[in-house]
Structure formats: C-alpha cells, structure tokens
Amino acid sequence: MNKKISRAFISVSDKTGLIQLAKKLVEQKVEIIASDGTAAHLKASGIATKSVEQVTGFAQVLDGRVKTLHPNIHAAILADLDQSSHLADLKTLGITPIDLVVINFYDASKFDIGGPAAVRAGVKNSKHVALLTDPAQYPEFIEKLAQGFDQSQRDSWAKDALLKVANYDLAILSKLGQPLRYGENPHQSAVVVGDKLIAGAKILSGKEMSYNNYVDADAAWKTVNCYTEPTIAFIKHSIPCGIASAPTLSKAFESSLASDPISAFGGVIAANQLVDKEVATLVIENFYEVLIAPGYSDEALKLLKSKENLRVVQISPDQGGSLELKQILGGFLFQQPDQLDQAGDDFKMWKLVAGADVEKSQITDLSFAWRAVKNIRSNAIVIAKNQATIGIGMGQTNRVDSVKIAINRAGDRAQGAVVASDGFFPFTDSIQLLIEAGVCAIVQPGGSIKDDEVIQACKNANISMYVTGVRHFSH
C-alpha cells in the first residue's frame, strides 16, 4: 500500500536540489521542519519552514552539538503508527508523526551526531517513514510524491541510508585507529582498529606490526586454529606455505618448515599452543617477520627477544565474529564464516567412491589435509604425509596448474602421500598427474558433471578417493 507524505524533517549539509524538493513538498501540503542552517536556506527562498526549536521548544546547546536529539523529533520519526500504545503516547505528548526524513551528513572530521541518529531512527521505522540521504534520490521521489510510496521503495531507501551511516562510521573509526607505517604499499596510509584477536594482539617484542603483518598474522592464526593437536603454520602473502601437526610443537615446526623452506623465509609463523624454549630456539635460527601464539614460556621469550626484527605477538583465544565482511565498490558483502562444522568435514561421513578403505594413518593424513586446504586460496591442492603439508598449490585460475605446483613442491615425497582438493575435479587431467606422482588417496567435495570419469580414473589406478559433499572454497 502506498503511503503519502504529510510531515518532513530536513537537515542537509549538501543542499543540491533542496529548493526544488522543498517546493514540491509544499505543493503537496507537506509540513517542513528543518535544522537551523537548512531552515535558513529554505526561508531565504520563500519556503515555509519550522525550525527544530519551534517544534521542540528547546534551543540548541553546546555550540550546536545538541539540536535535534529531542523526543519531539525522534518520537515523531520512531512511532509505529500501527501500535495503539504508540498513538496514545503521541497524543499525550502532543507529537505529530514525521514520515519523511531528508538527511545528508557533514564531513566525518566534524563527527555528525544528529544526522546519523535521525537516519537510524528512520531506518528502524521504514514501515512508516521514507528516507532520502542523497540528492540523486530527489528526482525519483518528486516524480512519485503525489501517489505516495510503497514498502519496497521505503525499504530500498532505508537500506541505502544505513549503508551511508556504516560508511560514515567507518570513516570516523579510521581517524581513531592506531596509525601504521603505511598500508599494503608505502604510498598507502593505514590504521588498525580493534581490541580482540589479531587486531588486539599484544606485541611482546620487536618492531611495530605493519599492515601486511596483520593480514598474514590473521591468515596464520585462522589456519592453526583448525587443529587441536600442536600445530605450526608458515604464511607468506596470506597463503600457507607449510602446515604441520605433531605430538610436540617443535616437531610440528620442523615438519611445517620442511614443506617449503624457501617460501617460509621472512614469513609469519603461528603456533596454536604455548611456545617453549625448544621452539624458540628453532625460530631464531632464521629470519621471520612475526611469531604469533597464545603464550610463551619465560625462557622462550628471552630467546625470542634477542631477534630485534622479529615481532613476538601474543593473542587471546577469543572467538571470532558471526559474520565476515568484505568491502566492494559501492557496498559490502556479508557471509557466515567458513567453519569446519559441516557433516562432510567428519571422515566418518565421507563416501568412498574408488579404491579400498585406507589405513588409520592415512585417515589421519586425509583429515589433516582436508583441514589445511580450507585455508588455502582456490584453486587449492594439498599433498600431505605424516600430518604435514609437503606440497601446496594455490591461487591458480585452473585446478590442473595448482596440482602441478603442489607436485613440484612435493617432489619424490609425493610417493604414498594423500591429497585434498578444495573443489571438485572438472576433468581427469589433474587425477592423471597425481597418479603419476604416486599419491595413494584423494579427498574432494565432488559435484562435477564428470565425477564418473574422475572416479573411474582412480579406480583404474587403484587409488582411494573420498567425496565429502561439502566445499571449502577460498576465493
């Protein structure tokens, strides 16, 4: 059902198109309330306007910091006109509802309070309130003003308005963050904001963290947290170059480093358990940018502090957020974090589609590889043996190239190893390469239109293949 506009609240910094909009409102007999600067601009053009003070009976205070934050404004915007109790309150207080909010903010450096507050109120009550937060929206509004606006239109404006508030808050937040030396490149400025996990991690020794250090440390910590056994991960450019689990953290360190020692040099290391003297001794043998762990023994910390360029970071084991956010041009993408909590992440739920059941040690390796491949950029291939990666292929635009990279890294070690793929195999070419490399078992999500051909290739080579039915693709 279309709702017509009867009362508007206007407070704008950018006054583009405002006079034309206001004149159309007057033509439709819409009452206009405006903040001081906006009211003066409208009155100068002969447009009848009530000031906020006329409506609230309260003059602005604190040099204008408090102008519109008053029940006569916010209750008028927030009132749910379908609720009898709300209508009763409005009648008792003598408040007339506002059904149009026209707002745009002044520069973030001035930290607008009233504008975002009024917008959020309008968004909450978009069932009854239309919101305009951009002069570019005025022509469409004017065109449909006489007939009123349906719920889908009000919801669309509300979404745009809340997006503007989010961007505005982020702009303010960026000014309050901890400055970093620079961003991804020296010509980019950057800050870090946060008090938990990586953003709030405590630097115990070494230089300040850089933007790229934070990005790599985040990837490293997410990787080792996929395991309960003592685990070490080496990360370069946010991509694992070695992951290993073992009975002791020092053994995990050695096995993880052996995966790709050339790439590990100068990288970021993460440990999922307390770092002891034995691990610290291994760390200081080479140059690394960052070591991150939940804790350090006194002996370990003393050794690590001898490496002035090594950032020794302690992280609290708090849980991450329930949503992941990625900014794209013009907006945001939200998704639930990819967790290893699906039925298909449990080996017991995997379907054997080729070859014989594998031995217990191979089950352990397959499960290890499946957890590892989740943290590697697609197309991702992990070759593993003895709970350690020995070949990782990632970030390629086709899976066969990732397979080639993983095999090249593994070399002769691929004999008798297992493989995990983060996505299905679209053709048998990758399978043939893995067969020639000597692997003994493969786990993959399945789902290709050529699954039958891929499975048959494994059967022909007497290689075990398991299908999980769940994908962990990292775009």
Image (spheres, rainbow, N blue to C red):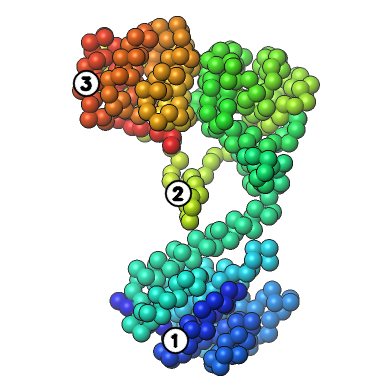
In the displayed structure, would residue 408 be above or below residue 66? Answer: above
Q: Around disc 3, counting alpha carbons within 10 Å, would you say few (fewer than 14), some (14 to 19), or many (20 or more)?
A: some
Q: For residue 436, which numbered disc appears in the image?
A: none
Judge whether 201 appears above or below 465 on screen.
below
Check disc 1 and give the amino acid type.
Lys
Query: Which mark is first along the chain, 1 or 2?
Result: 1
Please report whichever mark, 2 or 3, sits nearer to the chain's N-terminal start: 2
Q: Amino acid at mark 2?
A: Phe
Near-viewer residue (189 or 83): 189
- In the rendered image, the vertical position of residue 20 relative to residue 170, given as above or below: below
Percent x, y of residue 82: 37, 77
Q: Is residue 339 left or right of residue 347?
A: right
Name the residue rendered at 53%, 15% in the picture: 259
Q: Residue at 37% of width from left, 28% of height from top?
A: 398
Identify the element where label 2 is drawn: strand
The C terminus sits in image quarter: top left
Q: Residues within 10 Å of mark 1 (few under 14, many from 20)?
A: some
CA–CA distance in space, label 1 to label 3: 67 Å
- State the residue position of label 2: 334
Please provide percent x and percent y for residue 424. 31, 28
- Give the Cα distance between marks 2 and 1: 38 Å
Q: Is residue 132 visible?
A: yes
Question: In the rendering, which numbered label is found on residue 453?
Answer: 3
**Location of the N terminus (image quadrant):** bottom left
What amino acid is labelled 3 in the image? Answer: Glu
The x, y position of residue 210, in whole percent, is 68, 37
- What residue did someone put label 1 on? 24
User: In the displayed structure, does residue 146 sit left or right of residue 89?
Assistant: left
Which of discs 2 and 1 lies nearer the camera? The answer is: 1
In the rendered view, tell whether residue 147 sits above or below residue 331: below
Helix, strand or loop status at disc 1:
helix
